[in-house]
Amino acid sequence: MSEYLSDHVHLSDDGTAVVILDQTQLPNRTQYLTLRTAREMYDAIQSLQVRGAPCIGICAAYDLYVLAQQADAALSAADFLSKLREQAKYLASSRPTAVNLRWALDRMLHTAEHCADRADRLSVLRDECLAIHKEDIAMCRSIAEYGLSLVKDGDGILTHCNAGPLATSRYGTALGPLFLGKERGYKFHVFSDETRPLLQGARLTSYELSRGGIDVTLICDNMASLVMKNGWVQACFVGCDRVAANGDAANKIGTSGVAILAKHYGIPFYVLGPTSTIDLNCATGEDIPIEQRDPEEIKEKFYAEPMALPEVKCYNPAFDVTDHTLISGIVTEYGICRPPYTESLRAVFDKKHAGIPFGAPEEEHA
Ligand SMILES: CSC[C@@H](O)[C@@H](O)C(=O)COP(=O)(O)O
């Protein structure tokens, strides 16, 4: 795996800025951006220069640490916290669906609130954002291990959008089992939906897999039914932006259609994501806010000239919710949750709150 796929969001050498790989330029240009102001950070997330649920959480944690350093050192603890809360609120408003963003910012705020010593506040915030990043790497690795236990060598896997290293850290979630399998000599055949309108499947997933030496075939979204009918797909692996307590899962627009097709053809459909993407405060998918994006993304963004008349209306929701009844399993760092999800997801959080370490030892699935 290329080194930058593990390190596409990080602090600058002097720690005073956040450096990101600009994902809007891939696969044609490898261009890094240095973010120093709250506005630059907000824009990078909103414009998808940095994207993918866990990745925007990691980035926002680094962002808040960088912004905390810019606060006047003389500020009282109360004023420092109030400034930090204001900045966290602003960053959180950049994208509403992926709960990891809010989760990471809340975790940073919680750390700041519990830091008694004013002299230590920056160093504890630095440790916390680095820990969030490090934990995501470990969670992805564990998800990859559990996910790999669901498929066998030679299988065809269909995926939608991008839930690989670029959307997370290192292995990725939905693509994690594929990268791990590759390391162990498995030969998967992956079908990557291009994922209209912003083409994360074409620009990012097929790029990551191809560079990782994994057999990948790019298809238009409307070809998924045919490749399933042809018997070329043995499982669907997708990521998630927010999972509700009942197992309804929000992911990139088009995911629910893939799940409906998979059900029709009798193909297992798996959602893979860390517990930081599960929001037990949302009882069902109805409670998940869905981001609406600029119609220009449908009509113009990737075309030399507009693809529809200016007066034509566009509806551009960035995500949809896959009903829990269509999901064969939700793969977390603690293991594979099966229906009924209200119970199995709760059990995962019970383990987490009890401080039980997660991890899928290789032997468990050999
Ligand atoms: C591991 S990331 C899972 C999801 O964030 C991913 O599938 C997705 O929908 C990303 O959407 P994006 O709008 O590109 O941020």
Image: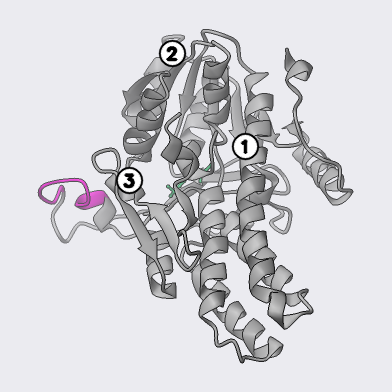
Disc 1 is placed on an element classified as helix
Q: Is residue 288 visible?
A: no
Q: Which residue is mark 3?
A: 198
Q: CA distance from mark 3 to mark 1?
A: 24 Å
Q: Is residue 46 above or below residue 7?
A: below
Q: Position of residue 173 (x, y in %)?
A: 57, 35
Which secondary structure lies at badge 3? loop
Q: Residue at x 39, y 73 (%)?
A: 39
Residue 248 on image: x %, y %: 64, 44
Q: Which residues are magenta?
A: 298-307
Instruction: Give neighbour class at mark 3: few <14, some 14-19, many 20+ (Cα, 10 Å).
Output: some
Q: CA distance from mark 1 to mark 2?
A: 31 Å
**Residue behind mark 2:** 229
- Asked if residue 299 is among those painted magenta in the image, a careful observer would answer yes
- Foreground tag (1 vs 2): 1
Residue plotted at (37% across, 62% down):
34
**Quarter holding residue 121:** bottom right
The residue singled out by tag 1 in the image is: 140
Task: Inspect the image, locate mark 2, and give the three-letter code of the amino acid beneath it.
Answer: Lys
> Residue 285: where, in percent of width, then height?
62, 50
Residue 122: % across, % down: 63, 73
Say which label, 1 or 2, has the lower sequence index: 1
**Residue type at numbered disc 3:** Leu
Q: Which badge, 2 or 3, is on the more N-terminal residue?
A: 3
Q: Decide: is 106 above or below 265.
A: below
